[in-house]
Structure formats: C-alpha cells, structure tokens
Image (cartoon, helix red, strand yellow):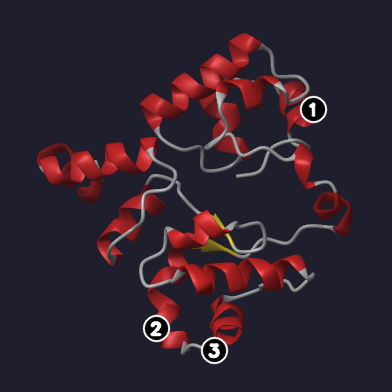
Amino acid sequence: MNQNWLSFRLNPRLQKLRANLLSNPYHRLQSGEEIAIAVELGIRIDANQAVVDDWLRLPGLSIHQAQSLVEISRTGVKYYCIEDIAAALNMSVQRLKPLERIIDFSYYDEEALSNPTQLINPNQATLEALMRVPFIDSSLAEAVVQNRASEGYFRSLVDFQQRLSLTPDAIAQLMYYLRF
C-alpha cells in the first residue's frame, strides 16, 4: 500500500479533502499538498481545453489570469508546456512550476477542436449529460456516476474501460465522445 493512501486512511483532514475533491469539481486547491492529492486522485487540467473554472482551481491564479488563458486559447494558441502558460500570463516559470504536475498539455487535431460539443468529460458530467452521449445508455451512465463517486475520477480511457469492464468494441465507439 503506498504511503499517500495510508495517509488518507489515517488522517481525517485528508479524508475530508479527498471527499471534497471527488464531489466538488470547483474546489479551489490551496497548496502543493492538495495538488499532489488531486493528481493522485486522477484530477488533471487540460491546458488546451480548460475553462475559467478549471484554471481557478489552481492556487495563486486570479480570475483575470484564468480569463486571459481561456481567451488566448480560444484564439487558436496552443499551450505545449508550463513555459507557455508563464509567457501568456507574463509570470516567471518558477512561480508556476508547482502547478505543472496537475496540468496536461494535450494535443488535439483540428477536427476534434472544431466539434467540442461532442466531447464529454465523464469525471464531471451529470447522469443526464452522459446519457446524451451516443452508445451510453441509462445503465452505463449510472455505472459511470456510481463508480466515479466510489472510486474517484477516471484517469484515462484505459482506466475508464477497466473500471467499468467495457469491451474493446464499446471503447472503440465511446473514445470519440469522451475526454479526460
């Protein structure tokens, strides 16, 4: 058993933080320790798909900075590394380095970016939103919500498949509609 997981079980404050992180997608992280716990739970921020609320989860970022990052991204600028975020905010890289472990710098092809309404994050989607995804029926949507509540956020498509015992065919159909 890893040491961090043992800390969760023994420390009531960490258990409360874990429950809050899993149930509240808008919980604002307060420290490097909270970032580490969030990362361990599979919480990530996709720099190229993040909305203002995603950026506001990070300690030390203001609403104006979050809005700037989103506006810059909407113009077509891609963030490839923490240095890009620092340059966009006119901040030192050293100040943002502690945030790097929770930020994903994913690449999306132009076709996927041009149709973002199809992409659903199963870590944040409601039961109703999940049922609007092609190939997800009510029983699978309920399983997603229940598994997420009991086991935490899905870390990837593979994690999603394994935890829900989905067939390769099901994942082949769903992978075009999900983002993590």
- Residue 95: numbered disc: 2
Q: Amino acid at mark 2?
A: Arg
Spatial distance from mark 1 to mark 3, Cα to Cα? 41 Å
Marks 3 and 2, the one that precedes in the sequence: 3
- Disc 3/disc 2 C-alpha distance (Å): 11 Å
Quadrant where the N terminus lies?
Answer: top left
Relative vertical location of residue 96 with respect to residue 176 in this rendering, above or below: below
Q: Are marks 3 and 2 in contact (CB under 8 Å)?
A: no
Kindly identify which residue carries mark 1. 173
Going by the numbered disc 1, the residue's amino acid type is Gln
Q: Is residue 90 above or below residue 150?
A: below
Amino acid of disc 3 = Asn
Q: Quadrant of residue 25?
A: top left
Classed neighbour count for the residue bearing mark 2: other residues with Cα under 10 Å, few (<14), some (14–19), many (≥20):
few
- Position of 110 with respect to 52 (left or right) is right
Mark carried by residue 90: 3
Q: Where is residue 117? Give x, y as percent.
A: 77, 41
Measuring from the top left, give residue 98's x and y in whole percent.
38, 73
Give SS at disc 2.
helix
> Relative to residue 60, is residue 160 drawn left or right?
right
At horizontal 60% and vertical 18% (from top left) the residue drawn is: 141
Between residues 126 and 84, which one lies in front from this camera angle? 126
